[in-house]
Amino acid sequence: MTQTVIIGGGPAGMAAAIAAARRGEETLLVERLDRVGKKLLATGNGRCNLMNRSAPAYPGGEAFARQVLARCGEKELEAFFRSLGLRLRTEDMGRVYPASGQAASVLDALRMALTREGVALRVSCPVQRLEKRGGSLLLSLPEETLRAARVIVAGGGKAQPKLGSDGSCYALLTSMGHTLRRPFPALTQVETDTAPLRGLSGIRVKAEAWVTQKGRELHRTRGEVLFADYGLSGVCVMQLARFAQGREACLHLDLLPALGLESAEECAAELAKRQSRWSDAPLEQLFTGLCVTRLGAALLRRAGVGPLSRPIASLTGEEIKALTALAADFALPVRGVKGFDSAQVTAGGIPWEEFSPDNLTSRLCPGLYAAGEVLDVDGDCGGFNLMFAFASGILAGSDGYLEEVLS
């Protein structure tokens, strides 16, 4: 009987396997794809944002994530990465990357540790069924059935299925008595009404963004926004995607930062000044120096101010007021969000309440553990999701005995 079997060769699974083997357990890692770590190579635009030194930011499962990170947080993760031979570098907003700047360096270090610690590895090996039999757990593989004392399910959620997360691990856990909260894509692009965005595709701006539903604000962020043919992208917007999936959702942009202005009052004063100084210039030049021509034209068009050939002097007080209001609140009705193929992470999943934050063991089935994205925990961009994956994997693999696996 194998002591510990880990299902899933992503960050959580590899960390769990290394931790379990360091405790002296006979450890097997099974992965349904032809190699481990495919999704890890794509993280952080190939740079692998391992963790974040800022306060935890988890819109989904925040209480549980904080408890896990209180046990295996920044200090413990640094010790784990150091034990793999990885050197780290901290950049803006607390984001931590490998010093090499390459995700491949992280994967190479993890793979070397798996080999060094004696972890058995089987790839192209989907787990077809999981069941409890007496005091052990049975795993049905394509060509055999395994018996294990411990099973750690770390196969991810449904985001990026081409990289290995297809949601198949949900069924393994629900077959053992666990429940499932509806999975939905998070950290993905938002599809909006496209008429107001005509001509803006490819433009990047700094903005404050927020989502409302039936007029009630749900969440607010700030950062870079990318205009696209289908709607909006950029980190700022992607962090709003999980809140933008209800009926009558609307995404709002405060574009004043993109214009270099700090308030609606300053915007109105600037436009009035331009009306006075550039009276003979055509309206199409009103926003010259504040933003790219296409964005200025979109603001004028949506505010109903035209034609663009008329002189700036002809602007009325009401038109200046309308342009100012629009720049401060460029509202776009939400049509949907991009699906799991585009999403960086899954929201929803197996409820975290059904697992202990001490060691990620199931409260329903002794010997069963879960780690990483398969649980209903999702964080903001910036390394928070990888941080939870590694931390939960280490806790599960070590069964909570961190001091034995971090040296």
Image (tube, rainbow, N blue to C red):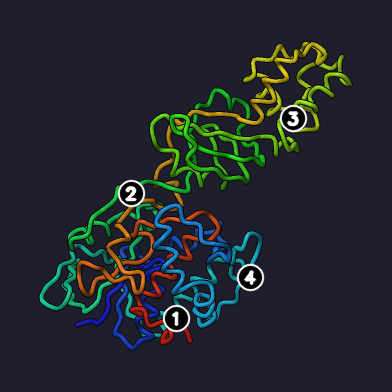
- On the image, numbered disc 3 is attached to which residue? 265
In terms of secondary structure, where does tag 3 sit? helix
Q: Is residue 157 left or right of residue 386?
A: left
> Label 4 is placed on what type of residue?
Arg
Q: Earlier in the sequence, mark 2 or mark 3?
A: 2
The correct choice, above or below, for 348 with respect to 30 in the image is above
The residue mark sitting in front, 2 or 3, is: 3
Q: In the displayed image of the protein, which residue is found farthest to the left?
A: 134
Looking at the image, which residue sits at the far right?
277
Q: How many marks?
A: 4
Q: Nearer the viewer, residue 247 or 389?
A: 247
Q: Which label lies toward us, 4 or 1?
A: 4
Looking at numbered disc 3 in the image, what kind of residue is underneath it? Glu
Q: Residue at x 22, y 59 (%)?
A: 178
| Residue 130 lies in quadrant | bottom left
**Circle 2 is placed at which residue position?**
183
Query: Which mark is first along the chain, 1 or 4?
Result: 4
List x then y, in percent, for residue 214: 44, 29
Nearest to N terminus: mark 4 or mark 3? 4
Q: Which residue is mark 4?
A: 89
For label 2, the crowd category at 10 Å Cα-Cα, with few meaning under 14, some 14 to 19 and many 20 or more, is many
